[in-house]
């Protein structure tokens, strides 16, 4: 390509990172070259400078400068997945229809690939085609060590509508966490901006001032469902925004780090005799279904949280059976 070109982000590319979009359309472009073109403002999204991790929305215009002779895009073929891994992934399915799959993501499984990641959910999605021509698509994400409900789209159209629901806050997400300490007051709203900060062990998220340029507003509703004296609490967390590590940092801000969260809580997030795994679980979701109505789903607690609940005497109700129901969310 020897001239400037503008391409429009397609419906099935909702929420895709800019670097991944370029790898899809221009697989021959080296990462370093892409980074330089972004740094110098030669690549723009809707006329504005963008970062390598910028997430795209359908209809946005991407300016592409002359790139020289690069490999043409290659059609994506179905990848072969180890049969044992495929069976394990199928067992995680909580709900499936023609448009949507709901998974119960286990602890420790990264949703997407990256440096040092050998296996990710995204790399295994071909195992969830169930005979369909299209490869399932991620429409939202959970941290590697967060468990629970994860929604996957089965078609390009469903991906676009589900991604739009997450962006517009039409998705009602509910998390459960075990915290070290009990918040005071026991329920309320946290309206505390977050910003990314460089640290000795890589990038972290931290509470920020409302007037800081790089601060992003982050809002979480919380309530205490049970407590073990002042030692620990079972919290229900409802994020109204979707910032990276929002719930983990907001709980630290409450003075009650999530049990096992060494990254943000440090030693204060550990309790002797309890698993040092993150105790954060995506319990449930209610989201407009791409074909109408509302999809409601809940995931059971993972094994390490079941053990902790039993130790503290917390009694969790059984999850509802996932289903698409008539009506609106709420």
Image: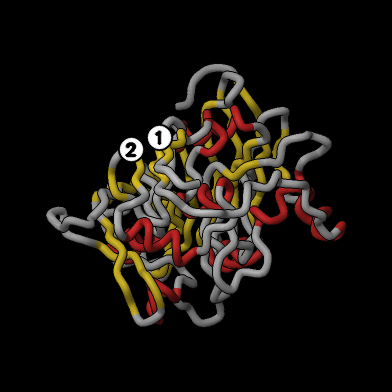
Question: Residue 47's spot in the image, x, y percent?
Answer: 29, 40
Horizontal relation, residue 127 to residue 64: left or right:
right
Q: Is there CB contact under 8 Å for labels 2 and 1?
A: yes
Q: Where is residue 324, by image quadrant?
A: top right
On screen, residue 177 above or below 311:
above
The Cα atoms of the two marked residues, 2 and 1, are separated by 6 Å
The structure residue drawn at horizontal position 56% and vertical position 25%, both measured from the top left corner, is 294
Horizontal relation, residue 134 to residue 80: left or right:
left
- For disc 2, the neighbor class at 10 Å (few under 14, some 14 to 19, many from 20) is some
Horizontal relation, residue 315 to residue 58: left or right:
right
Identify the residue position indicated by label 1 in the image: 60
SS of the residue under disc 2? loop
Quadrant placement of the C terminus: top left
Instruction: Compare residues 43 and 5 and report the one nearer the observer.
Output: 5
The structure residue drawn at horizontal position 37% and vertical position 63%, both measured from the top left corner, is 36
Question: Residue 27's spot in the image, x, y percent?
Answer: 59, 54
On screen, residue 319 above or below 228:
above
Identify the residue position indicated by label 2 in the image: 46
């Amino acid at each position: 390509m020897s001239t400037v070109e503008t391409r429009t982000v397609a419906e099935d590319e909702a929420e895709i990172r800019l670097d991944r979009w370029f790898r899809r359309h221009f697989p021959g472009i080296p990462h370093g070259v892409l980074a330089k073109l972004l740094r110098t403002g030669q690549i723009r999204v809707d006329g504005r400078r963008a970062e390598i991790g910028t997430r795209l929305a359908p209809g946005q215009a991407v300016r592409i400068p002359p790139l020289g002779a690069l490999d043409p895009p290659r059609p994506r073929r179905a990848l072969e997945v180890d049969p044992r891994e495929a069976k394990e992934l199928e067992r995680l399915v909580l709900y499936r229809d023609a448009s949507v799959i709901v998974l119960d993501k286990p602890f420790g499984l990264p949703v997407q690939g990256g440096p040092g990641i050998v296996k990710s959910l995204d790399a295994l999605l071909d195992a969830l085609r169930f005979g369909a021509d299209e490869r399932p698509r991620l429409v939202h994400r959970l941290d590697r060590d967060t468990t629970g409900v994860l929604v996957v789209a089965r078609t390009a159209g469903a991906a676009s509508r589900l991604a739009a629901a997450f962006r517009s806050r039409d998705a009602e997400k509910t998390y459960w966490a075990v915290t070290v300490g009990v918040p005071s007051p026991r329920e309320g709203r946290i309206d505390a901006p977050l910003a990314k900060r460089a640290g000795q062990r890589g990038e972290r998220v931290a509470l920020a001032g409302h007037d800081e340029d790089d601060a992003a507003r982050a809002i979480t509703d919380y309530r205490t469902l049970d407590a073990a004296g002042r030692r620990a609490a079972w919290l229900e967390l409802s994020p109204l925004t979707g910032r990276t590590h929002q719930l983990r940092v907001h709980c630290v801000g409450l003075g009650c780090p999530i049990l096992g969260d060494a990254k943000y809580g440090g030693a204060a997030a550990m309790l002797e005799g309890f698993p040092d795994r993150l105790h954060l679980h995506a319990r449930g979701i209610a989201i407009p279904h791409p074909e109408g109505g509302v999809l409601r789903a809940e995931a059971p607690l993972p094994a390490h949280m079941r053990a902790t609940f039993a130790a503290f005497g917390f009694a969790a109700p059984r999850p509802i059976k996932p289903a698409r129901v008539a009506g609106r969310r709420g």
